[in-house]
Image (cartoon, rainbow, N blue to C red):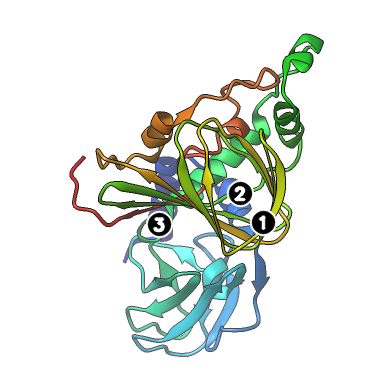
């Protein structure tokens, strides 16, 4: 069996390949998470580990196929928070949407530590989201001049004010069908965001929720389900009064599968004189800034 030093070295090599540190892992594990160490730990106990910090150990002999709930939504349980890494694991995680189950893959004797191979269970979107959030925290905002302020639009000014507030995630799902690109965006209650300048006329659907919307034409409050048409040249400020789910539907005759390239083609770049064009808060439409999921249903090779 691999010794503890080798397991630690493998873990450190794994973190290096991801470009994160152990302290980064702790921050990601604890961000917006409620940890419950009492439920879903039958036959298990939390003890000091020779591998790393605390570990999860068998309080009795455990057979193959034993299951525990590791996490559900924002709640993490012992198997989802305490279990350590090994390239020679005796457990694995099974993912089902926001539900994660820990399952034994080998017999585990009483007193032995439960282990999973983190390499098989890393979520690249979570890593990218964390890196973007730390990049935002480190980014030095532009200090606008009086001339910049006077030349900016009302939406520019609100966008700048939003950049000084805590960052809210707007998760995106990019759906590709033959000839169409469908962009799904989820905004949690209380979040606010601005849009790019649209260069096409296309339908949008508020699937659910209530939002207040200010555009360069008017202001309104809409509640889903609602369908409207975005006209060419439109730019909006959106305030989610409740949790809200949006869809925008765009022609994609070339069946492109890079959402950033599609957005570049169907929008006009926004130049806000109050903000640096490289500021991550000014580029949340990009797939590597907002948490993104790709759904490809067409058979294009483009």
At mark 2, the secondary structure is loop
In space, the residues marked 1 and 3 are separated at their CA atoms by 54 Å
Vertical position of residue 135 compared to residue 224: above or below: above
Q: Quadrant of the image for the C terminus? A: top left
Q: Residue at x 24, y 38 (%)?
A: 254
At mark 3, the secondary structure is helix
- Binning the other alpha carbons within 10 Å of mark 2 as few (below 14), some (14 to 19) or many (20 upward) gives some
Q: Earlier in the sequence, mark 1 or mark 3?
A: 3
Residue 21 shows in the view: no
Vertical position of residue 50 compared to residue 9: above or below: below
Q: Residue 169 got which mark?
A: 2
Q: Which residue is under mark 1?
A: 222
| Residue sitting farthest toward the right | 146
Q: Position of residue 220 (x, y in %)?
A: 71, 49
Q: Quadrant of the image for the N terminus? A: bottom left
In space, the residues marked 1 and 2 are separated at their CA atoms by 21 Å
Q: Nearer the viewer, mark 1 or mark 3?
A: 1
Q: Earlier in the sequence, mark 2 or mark 3?
A: 3
Q: Which residue is under mark 3?
A: 7
In terms of image quadrants, where is residue 105? bottom left
- Binning the other alpha carbons within 10 Å of mark 1 as few (below 14), some (14 to 19) or many (20 upward) gives some
């Amino acid at each position: 069996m691999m010794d503890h030093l080798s397991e630690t070295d493998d873990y450190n090599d794994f973190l290096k390949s991801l470009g994160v540190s152990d302290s980064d892992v702790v921050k990601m594990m604890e961000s917006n998470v409620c940890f419950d160490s009492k439920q879903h730990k039958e036959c298990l106990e939390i003890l000091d580990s020779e591998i790393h910090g605390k570990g999860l150990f068998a309080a009795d002999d455990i057979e193959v196929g034993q299951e525990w709930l590791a996490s559900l939504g924002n709640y993490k349980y012992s198997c989802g928070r305490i279990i350590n890494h090994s390239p020679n694991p005796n457990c694995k995680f099974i993912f089902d949407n926001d539900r994660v189950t820990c399952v034994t893959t080998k017999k585990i004797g009483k007193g032995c530590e439960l282990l999973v191979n983190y390499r098989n269970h890393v979520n690249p979107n979570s890593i990218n989201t964390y890196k973007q959030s730390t990049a935002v925290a480190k980014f030095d905002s532009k200090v606008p001049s009086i001339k910049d302020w006077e030349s900016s639009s009302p939406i520019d000014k609100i966008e700048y004010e939003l950049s000084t507030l805590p960052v809210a995630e707007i998760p995106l799902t990019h759906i590709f069908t033959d000839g169409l690109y469908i962009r799904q965006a989820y905004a949690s209650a209380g979040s606010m965001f601005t849009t790019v300048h649209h260069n096409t006329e296309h339908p949008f659907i508020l699937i659910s929720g209530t939002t207040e919307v200010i555009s360069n034409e008017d202001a309104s409050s809409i509640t889903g389900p609602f369908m409207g048409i975005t006209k060419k040249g439109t730019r909006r400020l959106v305030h989610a009064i409740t949790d809200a789910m949006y869809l925008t539907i765009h022609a994609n005759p070339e069946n492109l599968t890079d959402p950033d390239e599609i957005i570049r083609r169907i929008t006009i770049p926004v130049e806000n004189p109050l903000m640096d064009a490289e500021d991550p808060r000014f580029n949340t439409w990009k797939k590597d800034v907002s948490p993104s999921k790709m759904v490809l249903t067409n058979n294009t090779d483009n």
